[in-house]
Amino acid sequence: MSALNIRDSSTFPSRRVEAWKYSDLRRWLREAPEVSSAVAVSGDGPWAGLGGDQLAFGNGAAAGADAFVGSGEQVLRLRFVSETSGTGHTAAARISARPGARLLLLESHEGAGSGYVAHNRLEIDVAPGAEVTRLVLVEEPEDAISVTEAEVRLGEGARYAQTIAATGAKLQRLETRIVHPGQGADVRMDGVYALSGARHVDLTSVVDHQGPDGRTSQLAKGVVRDTARGVFQGKIVVQRGADGTDARMGHHALILGERAEIDAKPELIIYADDVQCAHGNTVGNLDESALFYMQQRGLPADEARALLTQAFLFEVIDRIDHEGARERVREWLGDRL
Amino acid sequence: MLKINNLHVSVGDKPILKGLTLDVPAGEVHAVMGPNGAGKSTLGYALTGRPGYEATQGEAAWNGADLLALDPAERAAKGVFLSFQYPIEIPGVPALTFVRTALNAQKRARGEEEVSAPAFLKLVRAASQKLRMDFDMLKRPLNVGFSGGEKKRMEILQMALLEPSLLILDETDSGLDIDALRIVADGVNALRSPERAMVVITHYQRLLDYIRPDRVHVLAGGRIVASGGPELAHELEAEGYDKYLPQAA
Ligand SMILES: Nc1ncnc2c1ncn2[C@@H]1O[C@H](COP(=O)(O)OP(=O)(O)OP(=O)(O)O)[C@@H](O)[C@H]1O
Ligand SMILES: [Mg+2]
């Protein structure tokens, strides 16, 4: 299977491709869409207020530079704006953090219009000893299709933390692939989704531990209502020789609609010795006795449900170190529950 | 006045309460005692509207309001409070946030003004001091990892803050050490007033030394089978429930 190219329909994966089993792109997209025209990017996006530099794409076209090199302490707002109907576009961005840099990468996918196809490719290089925190807010129309592929390369002793918050679309896939060198490098790979209607989100990640003593901690949580569908595919590979790896993965979802669905595929593939690995996956419902208890104290049923749901999801958000950004994600998500 | 008349309650298909009648006038404290499995907790759940506890017959009214017609939150707003035999853990919701949200939801339902965050903090500080609770504990998710006794204190703290008018205490004494029992009883006694009625469910006379009941009732086989003054509790402690149980054939 060759790399996805939205101008070439022969590259559109169907569910027969293992990695796309739960997100059948070909079902929704048979032919290459007409190419979108560029649009100007206005305003500051959902991360306004946290300052920093901006790298923006309007219907795939870079408004200025398409690459950013971070050194020292920096904040970058990376905005993928789609504003079109029925057309398709690809954006490609390159981000790197120099040795010792601390970069807060505030990414947003801002969709307006309808029925568009967006493909975003992102390369992130984190130099030895550098630190990148990538926080992603994704909000798109219910009939949009979007696929975001991030390729992350870490140097020795690098730190990379990621939190994706998504509300889904007709098909919305956020894929992250990390080459983990071990050698004290540290990865946090989190995600949270809240879906209603017929929305679909797919959080897919592959973390490939190639050297010893690397750490990966992954926590994904979601709620699905109505006929929405949440897909979580988390794969952690520990290669031969990557001894001393510490990898933990958890995915937990709440199904709040009788016809909603969760497909989870957590995978730990271990070829090394002496590793600490664990994964957990649960799918459930809101705790009825907790709901009654809350109502007994005066909370109306809806409010009780909302508070429990929010508390469930915020566990993921609370793992964001940067206080201002954490508060922003809490607020953003809280408004969308 | 709490007026329960001929109340029948089933859990699933199983009848548990079978024609329970009980009046508790405002200003009074009534103890309900009875063997394990008699239906004491079921009574508390039925009065507060727990799903699955279905009233199939009879009435229950508090100050004239038909409780059975209201949803649980509406009953709470009418002043009905159940201190749970086994308080539930609410993961991710700090106790402080929870109680303030509950208090303001009740106030909203009654058309009263909500309490601001600083005013609420002041109330909680005072109330938690009285119950000798560590304030930092209130920043933790409600009841999660609390010890049995801490959970019971947390129930009484909520009661003190929500100021209900009909208080149902389901084995609030179980799991409390001797000092905690006294502190909790003081907390309950502080709420005694001419407008409030209390139903105190317990297995032990000891609690009733601290919270003096006006009346004591025996619940067995889904009904109130005997009622008396405080001396009835002593009698039960000495003799057990044998004479109230259906005789084996
Ligand atoms: N969810 C349930 N499903 C089936 N039976 C139930 C359920 N809840 C309660 N019961 C049954 O109802 C009866 C009454 O239970 P309840 O908890 O009211 O007793 P209790 O008087 O409070 O007992 P205890 O003194 O042990 O607390 C018991 O036989 C119990 O097994
Ligand atoms: Mg009981």
Image (cartoon, coloured by chain):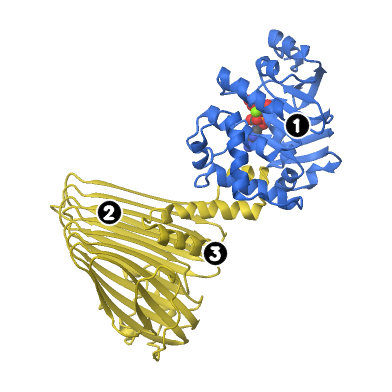
Chain colours: A yellow, B blue
Q: Quadrant of residue B81?
A: top right
Q: Residues within 10 Å of mark 2 (few under 14, many from 20)?
A: many
Q: Is residue A174 above or below residue B74?
A: below
Frontmost residue, B183 versus A122: B183
Q: Is residue A337 above or below residue B82?
A: below
Q: What's the distance in space between the residues labelled 3 and 1, CA to CA?
A: 44 Å
A167 relative position to A19: left or right = right
Residue B17's label in the rendered image is 1
Name the secondary structure under disc 2: strand
Q: Residue at x 71, y 34 (%)?
A: B44
Q: Residues within 10 Å of mark 1 (few under 14, many from 20)?
A: many
B239 relative position to A228: left or right = right
Q: Is residue A288 visible?
A: no
Place of residue A105 in the rendered image (x, y in percent of width and height, measured from the top left): 33, 68
The amino acid type found where label 2 is placed reads Thr
**Residue at the far top in the pictured view:** B238
Quadrant of the snapshot with the N terminus of chain B: top right
Q: Residue at x 75, y 31 (%)?
A: B17
Place of residue A96 in the rendered image (x, y in percent of width and height, measured from the top left): 23, 71
The amino acid type found where label 3 is placed reads Asp
Q: Chain of mark 3?
A: A
Name the secondary structure under disc 1: strand
Q: Is residue B208 above or below residue B81?
A: above
Frontmost residue, A130 versus B49: A130
B239 relative position to A166: left or right = right
